[in-house]
Amino acid sequence: MRICRFNNDRLGLVQDDEVLDITAAIECLPAQRWPVSYCDPVIEHLDQIRKLAIELAPNAKRFALSDVVLNSPVSIASKLPAAPVNYLKHMAEAQSDPTTFHAHHLKKIEEVGLFLKASSSLVGPGDGVALRHLERRNDHELELAVVIGKTADRVSETDAMHYVAGYAIGLDMTIRGPEERSLRKSIDTYSVLGPWLTTADEVGDPSALEIELHVNGELRQKANTRDLVVNIPKLISWASSYYTLLPGDVIFTGTPDGVGPVIPGDVITASIEKVGQMQVKVRAA
């Protein structure tokens, strides 16, 4: 099942080239009072949402997919853990260009661990990317994004996949420079998630998915998730050993080689096998 958030917080079921408005399904969600939860309520109650989606679909209002604005399928995340240099070819690419990639950021992922992106940087493809610090290089980084569906605290690699709600395409936008990753990658709109949540059962095994990114029609990144240095079960287990993962948290699994600069006016097209395709416009903040 492919579930989207569209047109300013409508809930949709994506079928072929249409979006079915199933916003009525959110009536099943418990009312929240202060203090509010850090969890995304739709992701937390995804099983109920999916059942209601099936019931509502036959009579739902339909929109052409091309006519809607796609927001991030995750409305709130307590954290966005991310994996640095998790493809060997990207490590080699970075090591060959010390002017762009600073040396103290080029240690192996096993040495540096994960980092966190600010949840306030999360947007959908329809929101676009608003670049800041235009005097510096701003890069695209295509990643498979894993959306956590259940509270995960110190889970084993064996059990890790049971905590996955689904997958999305992630763009880990980055300003190059000497500062820590979390600063340079946490700018508003620098975590693009979309085009929808593809549920885990629809994807199956995520360990051999083709991923591809174009800028203005030019191929920039092409790889397969089989080449991840640290695989998805280990990433989930590793992250949950340091902090509790909550429904709606998103793990950015790392980018392959081919990262490159974008400027205002560029259009990024990203696709991941079995997950979907999205187009993202780049502008100045």
Image: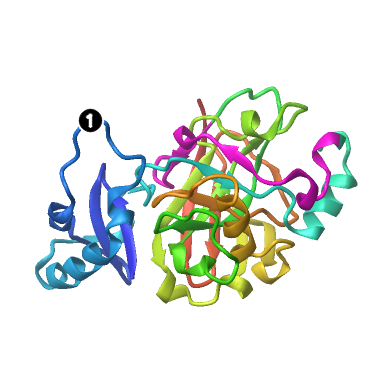
Q: Is residue 87 left or right of residue 209?
A: right
When the figure is inspected, residue 186 is found, relative to residue 24, above or below; the finding is above
Q: According to the image, label 1 marks what residue?
A: 34
Residue 255 horizontal/vertical position (percent): 67, 54
Q: Residue at x 19, y 39 (%)?
A: 32
Image quadrant where one finds the N terminus: bottom left
Task: Tell me which amino acid carries mark 1.
Answer: Trp
Camera-nearest residue between 34 and 101: 34
Magenta segment: 104-130
Q: Residue at x 78, y 54 (%)?
A: 90
State yes or no: residue 13 in magenta.
Answer: no
Query: Label 1 crowding class (10 Å Cα cut-off): few <14, some 14-19, many 20+?
Result: few
| Secondary element type, mark 1 | loop
State yes or no: residue 119 in magenta.
Answer: yes
Camera-nearest residue between 193 and 42: 42
Q: Residue at x 50, y 25 (%)?
A: 285
> Residue 271 lies in what quarter of the image?
bottom right
> Residue 63 lies in what quarter of the image?
bottom left
Q: Is residue 222 left or right of residue 153?
A: right
Residue 10 horizontal/vertical position (percent): 22, 49
Camera-nearest residue between 77 and 271: 77
Q: Is residue 144 left or right of residue 90?
A: left
Residue 44 horizontal/vertical position (percent): 31, 55
Residue 79 horizontal/vertical position (percent): 49, 41
Q: How many marks?
A: 1
Q: Looking at the image, can residue 168 be seen?
A: yes
Q: Residue at x 87, y 42 (%)?
A: 97
Q: Identify the image's colour scheme: rainbow, by chain, secondary structure or one colour.
A: rainbow
Q: Looking at the image, can residue 215 be seen?
A: no
